[in-house]
Image (spheres, rainbow, N blue to C red):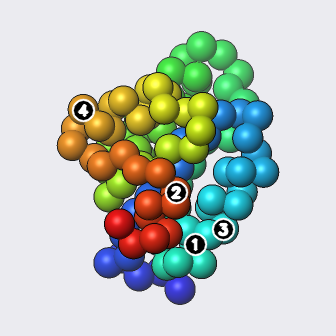
Amino acid sequence: MFNPTDPRAYVAAPAGAADALAAAVSALLDAGYLVATATADDPANADDLVALVADDMDTARAADFVVVLPGAEDFPEVVYAALHGVPVVALGDVLAGI
């Protein structure tokens, strides 16, 4: 059930880490977080790609925290969120309640 007071988590993960991303999303959902990830759409052109990336950046910035999986530490969403004061954390720290 949607609860607007649930904390919002954005998960950043490399494209090749689909299993780790799925496990992280599942664990966060089970812990009661609202979870967002990068858009999985396949853009038709450069303008669509720019719009998708902008949406992902805005979603990361609007999160209460960004969970970064190994290999995604320097992703644009992570850097952008951190520049806007959004905490960037490891999954284990979130699940441990840190």
- Towards the viewer: 58 or 64: 64
- Above or below, 55 against 64 in this view is above
Q: Kindly report the distance in space between the C-alpha atoms of the residues bearing marks 1 and 4.
A: 26 Å
Going from N to C along the chain, the mark reached first, 4 or 3, is 3
Q: Amino acid at mark 2?
A: Leu
Q: Is residue 67 left or right of residue 37?
A: left
Mark closer to the chain start, 2 or 4: 4
Q: Nearer the viewer, mark 1 or mark 2?
A: 2
Measured Cα–Cα span from mark 1 to mark 2: 12 Å
Place of residue 76 in the rendered image (x, y in percent of width and height, measured from the top left): 44, 26
**Residue identifier under label 3:** 26
Look at mark 1 in the image and give the residue it sits on.
Answer: 29
Q: Residue at the spot x=24%, y=32% of the render?
A: 83
Gap between marks 4 and 3 measured at Cα: 27 Å
Assign a secondary structure to mark 4: helix
Local secondary structure at mark 3: helix
Residue 82 x/y as whole percent: 29, 37
Q: Amino acid at mark 3?
A: Ser
How many angstroms separate mark 2 from mark 4 (CA)? 20 Å
The image shows residue 25, relative to residue 84, as above or below, that is below
Ranked by sequence position, the earlier of labels 3 and 2 is 3
How far apart are labels 3 and 2 at the CA level?
A: 11 Å
Q: Quadrant of the C terminus?
A: bottom left
Of the residues under marks 1 and 4, which one precedes in the sequence? 1
Callout 3: few (<14), some (14-19), or many (20+) C-alpha neighbours within 10 Å?
few
Q: Are marks 4 and 3 in contact (CB under 8 Å)?
A: no
